[in-house]
Amino acid sequence: MSIVSDTIALYRRELLIFKKNLITNTARAIIFPAVLILIFGNLGNNYLSHTKIAVVEYTYNQYVTQLLSSIESTGQFDVVAVTDQRSALSMLSNGTVDAVLVIEPSSNGISSPPSVIIYYSDTNFEVSGVAVSALESAAESISKSAQVAIKSINSNVQSSLVFSKQISYSSYLTGGIVVMVAVFGSVFGAGVTLITDKQIGFIKRVSMSPANKNAILLSKILYGLTVSTLYGIIALAIGILNGAQIAAGPIAITYIVVILALISLGFSSLSTLIAVRINRVDAFTIFANVITLPLWLLSGAFFPTTAFPKPLQFISNIDPMTYASQGIRYLMISGYYPANYQILDLSILIGFSLVLFIIASYMFKSVVK
């Protein structure tokens, strides 16, 4: 038999075992993310209560007075008055402020609301997204005829639909929870089943048969990838039901599935790598949690990594879960996924997955002969 047919046969066995425990597996996939999203998602809606914005006023009339009063009344922003646009954009570029509001000169004096430009930065889009959403809503609440433009200082993107107008902390949190559920599903889906099969002697029987030995590893990784991606999609659905939005629209779900598949492939390989050397499920669980939990927390699961101390930011920058969460949040919070960040995120995830898969394959061959 070929490695493909052997892998498919073993993979089907894993799916049959999953189906046999369908109720338990489904409950696990729903309850854990639901508790985190429903509790923390609704507790954290003011997590950006001190967002800093720079305001440049080239016009001052009754509409501007109402706009500034509306912004300050939210209690969300720390407003910094800046005399010119260049200085304000410089502050945004170096991270001193999270967004810039430019009130342009009005050709009609006090008879009409002036045009407004809201600038944000791609490098801190989680914070900027909420700020832009609130500023745009405030400007349009003063006058339905207000001209509001949204621009990024990092690209040529300009659109009033870049950010969803109903961005909430739930949208931010859901991105992190989706990745966490996928990672844990892959770790425990592939690793635990491998240890269980070793304990009942199944691995030994298969290794003594004519079946291709690599098919054992491939089926475990493929099973972990399948289950974890499914769990991630379920967590995403729970988040959407709780008010999270995908600003990029339904087409973004395809991107999200690709990101989940890549991060799941990497951690499925990691879990099999660990399970090869460990023969007890309880020991594996402890070891896996020690690795995955810190990585998840340092990926910016609950708040942006820019708030971390420098040493933790360094760890976050080499954490593959950071880039998976970043990609999904771009799609959920921002209405587009910049090409430079696509290349960065996907390259890191592909590289991480390939390296772990190669190491896992080598280690598995050295044990199963």
Image (spheres, grey):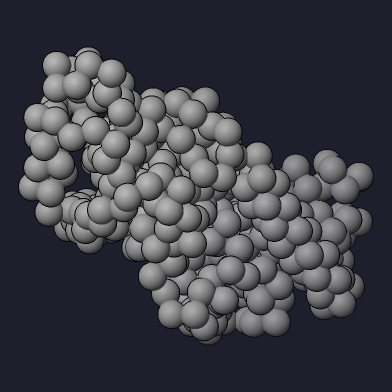
Q: Is residue 234 above or below residue 308?
A: above
Residue drawn at x 40%, y 32% as measured from the top left: 150
Image check: 280 left or right of 198? Answer: left
Residue drawn at x 14%, y 30% as measured from the top left: 61
Q: Nearer the viewer, residue 350 or 226?
A: 350
> Can residue 103 be seen here?
yes
Quarter of the image where the C terminus is located:
bottom right
Q: Is residue 18 above or below residue 103?
A: below
Q: Position of residue 30 (x, y in %)?
A: 33, 48
Quarter of the image where the N terminus is located:
top right
Q: Position of residue 223 (x, y in %)?
A: 63, 51
Tell me the quarter of the picture where residue 269 sits: bottom right
Q: Nearer the viewer, residue 84 or 117?
A: 84
Residue drawn at x 26%, y 56% as measured from the top left: 80
Image check: 285 left or right of 150? Answer: right
Q: Nearer the viewer, residue 299 or 197?
A: 299
> Can residue 178 be seen here?
no
Tell me the quarter of the picture where residue 140 sits: top left
The total of numbered circles placed on residues is: 0
Image check: 250 left or right of 83? Answer: right
